[in-house]
Amino acid sequence: MERAQGSSSPRSAEVLAFVGLGSNLGDRQNNIRTALDLIDSVSGLGVLGVSSFYECEPVGRSAQPDFINAVAEVGTSLSPRSLLKALQGIEKSMGRASSRRRWGPRLIDLDILLYGEALVLEPDLVIPHALMHVRRFVLAPLCELEPDIVHPVLGLRCRELLRRLRSGMSQARFAGQSVRVAV
């Protein structure tokens, strides 16, 4: 697990949140690193830890490049809504086009996975992320950071959710860096 330089533990007024990062266009690893730097630069938001990068096939539409995925642990004083707006602003600043195409190619994709123990159910914001418990490319990096974190709806630890998934993991080298491959 990588730790961001200059990061610190969350202050008492901050909430611990987890953000999923994904990219399958351009320099995927650099896109994720850039997004992490931008997240860390937002007032009221700080990157505390970053998982390994995982390479996986796209969900839904296979006629596109594979994704690189990671999870960032962040401390934030932002509300869930403000965090969403900050992440959408980062996506836009990095060139992500507004698209209604579900599961399409992405220069960068940033998703709030967990926000403390909060439960949010709004048309454009669902916390915990509605599909995180069935996505190995989310659970594997999340478990690297916090294997004992409990899903606030399902009441199961991350490592138990990961264990329940059927597909396997293998190791691969990608662009000179060790990257786990979700299959």
Image (tube, rainbow, N blue to C red):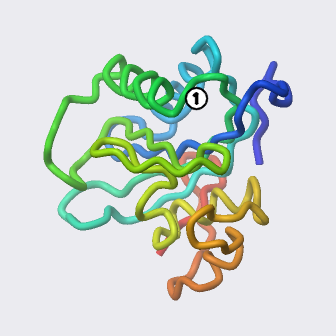
- Expressed as whole percent of the image width and height from the top left, the position of residue 14 reads 74, 28
Figure quadrant of residue 150: bottom right
Residue 174 vertical placement versus 133 (above, below): above
What amino acid is labelled 1 in the image? Leu
- Expressed as whole percent of the image width and height from the top left, the position of residue 163 reads 65, 83
**What's the residue at 53%, 60% (across, down)?**
138
**Image mark count:** 1
**What's the residue at 47%, 47% (across, down)?**
120
**What's the residue at 74%, 60% (across, down)?**
149
Most extreme residue toward the left is 100
Residue 148 vertical placement versus 51 (above, below): below
- The one of 106 and 132 positioned closer to us in this rendering: 132
108 left or right of 119 in image: left
130 left or right of 41 in image: left
- The one of 170 and 144 positioned closer to us in this rendering: 144
- Expressed as whole percent of the image width and height from the top left, the position of residue 156 reads 67, 74
Q: Quickly name the residue at label 1.
A: 36
**Label 1: how many residues lie within 10 Å, few (<14), some (14-19) or many (20+)?**
many
Label 1 sits on a secondary structure element that is: helix
Residue 136 vertical placement versus 24 (above, below): below
**What's the residue at 56%, 82% (across, down)?**
168
- Expressed as whole percent of the image width and height from the top left, the position of residue 23 reads 40, 43
Residue 49 vertical placement versus 66 (above, below): above
